[in-house]
Amino acid sequence: MSTFSFSYTAVDRKGEKCSGVARGASEVDAFRQITAAGLTPVKIRQVRTRSKSRGVGLKDVAHFTYQLSVLISARVPIGDGMKSIGEQEPPGKFRDVIFQIAAKIEAGGRIAEAMAEHTDVFGDLYIQTVRAAEETGNMVKVLEYLSDMLERTLETRQQVRSALMYPMCVVGTLMLAVTFLIGFVIPKFAKMFQEKNVELPIFTKLLMWFGQSMQAYWYVYLILLFGAVVGVRKAWRTEKGRWMIEDWLHKVPVLKDIMIGVAVARFSRVFGLCLNSGLGLIDALHMAGRASARARLIRDTDRMIEQVRAGGRISSVLVACQYIPPFAKRMLTSGEESAELTKMCSVIARHYERDTAALTKNISTIIEPVMIVLIAGVVLIVALAIFLPMWNMVNLMG
């Protein structure tokens, strides 16, 4: 079992203050060690150290959630269950986090309160859902739902990454090849043509100038590229910047469908999960909108929340939501009318997850013709820049 360091301030038998560090599996163990030394603890605080091991991924949290749901359904005490899960984890940050949560629970704390100290690992959505499940006594069912949601989110993320890997590699290789041709090949050919007094076409002159500038001021281009990447990342963290980037991405036909499908599936999963865990409609809408990670859908859910507060029903407030497709709106409306809103959320999520999976599997087939046209265009540009002056040189010599 992992042990942790606890700094403490205590009072000895003479009434004098002293301080030190105790090690134990929990704060309770540290307290016992301090009192056994004849001291009266005044303040105990865990010393947090940076872990040099790998971080905590979505897969780790999903696996932990499933194990915890199984142990709770088997009526194993939560503290003991947490410890048994932690003992199976490899040494690292997540193992330490699990033992810290177990120690807090054994000391009388609640699960959500113990997890709230590790928001960077679990996230606000996860913690708020667990808190609602604790209050409603629906912990096992909610944990199973959470585990399923996390696994599906991870699966979708992996599908999108694998689908985009091929076009990204092609574009990256093409950019390197073009940079080499423009920066090194074309300037040498242009110099040879100039020595032969061959008149260069304006097209070749432009590429030659660009290549020479790349050779002379390559560091400027690197700075500009680095600045562009940093600028896009900073813009993505702002509401206005994210809105502009998403607006541009939604103009790409296939990518638009994938983004909408992923966002709506995530919204539906989280919305159903929050309702199932006992959260109110307004809180469920708020958390589902934020979980979608889409600026447009967040704006639409904020409008829906305002209308719900004014007494509106889901069927009426969905009219103001432009991001959610008509199929999802019809399913949510029928779910509200039949009192099966949570079930309908699962149906919607599965539908769009299947659609997104099909799109991501076929994205390589869709992108291949675009890649071929792009490569052919680049090759044509470079060929014209070289062969047009060569043709002029042949005519001049003839």
Image: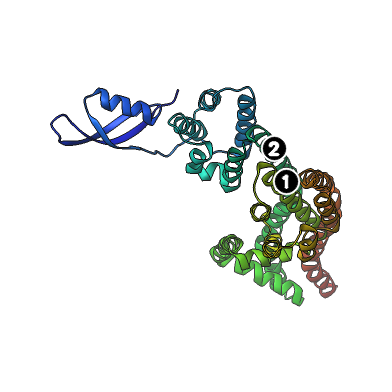
Is residue 360 visible from the viewing direction of this image?
Answer: no
User: Which residue is depicted at the point 78% across and 52% down?
Assistant: 261
191 relative to 366, above or below: below
Q: Nearer the viewer, residue 80 or 357?
A: 80
Is residue 107 visible from the viewing direction of this image?
Answer: yes
Asked if the residue at tag 2 contacts the one at tag 1, i.e. Cβ–Cβ closer than 8 Å, the answer is yes
Q: Amino acid at mark 2?
A: Tyr
Q: Nearer the viewer, residue 167 or 386?
A: 167
Q: How many numbered marks does the figure carry?
A: 2
The location of residue 147, given as percent across then percent down, is: 67, 36
- Residue 285, quarter of picture: bottom right
**Which color scheme did the rendering employ for the protein?**
rainbow
Residue that label 2 marks = 145
Q: Residues within 10 Å of mark 1 (few under 14, many from 20)?
A: many
306 relative to 115, above or below: below
Q: CA distance from mark 1 to mark 2?
A: 9 Å
User: Which residue is depicted at the point 83% across and 46% down?
Assistant: 351
Q: Residues within 10 Å of mark 2 (few under 14, many from 20)?
A: many
The location of residue 371, given as percent across then percent down, is: 81, 55
User: Which residue is depicted at the point 72% across and 76% down?
Assistant: 197
User: Which residue is depicted at the point 60% across and 31% down?
Assistant: 64
Q: Amino acid at mark 1?
A: Gly
Report helix, strand or loop for mark 1.
helix
The location of residue 151, given as percent across then percent down, is: 70, 37
The location of residue 54, given as percent across then percent down, is: 52, 36
Question: Which label number is shown at residue 371?
Answer: none
Residue that label 1 marks = 272
Q: Nearer the viewer, residue 360 or 322?
A: 322
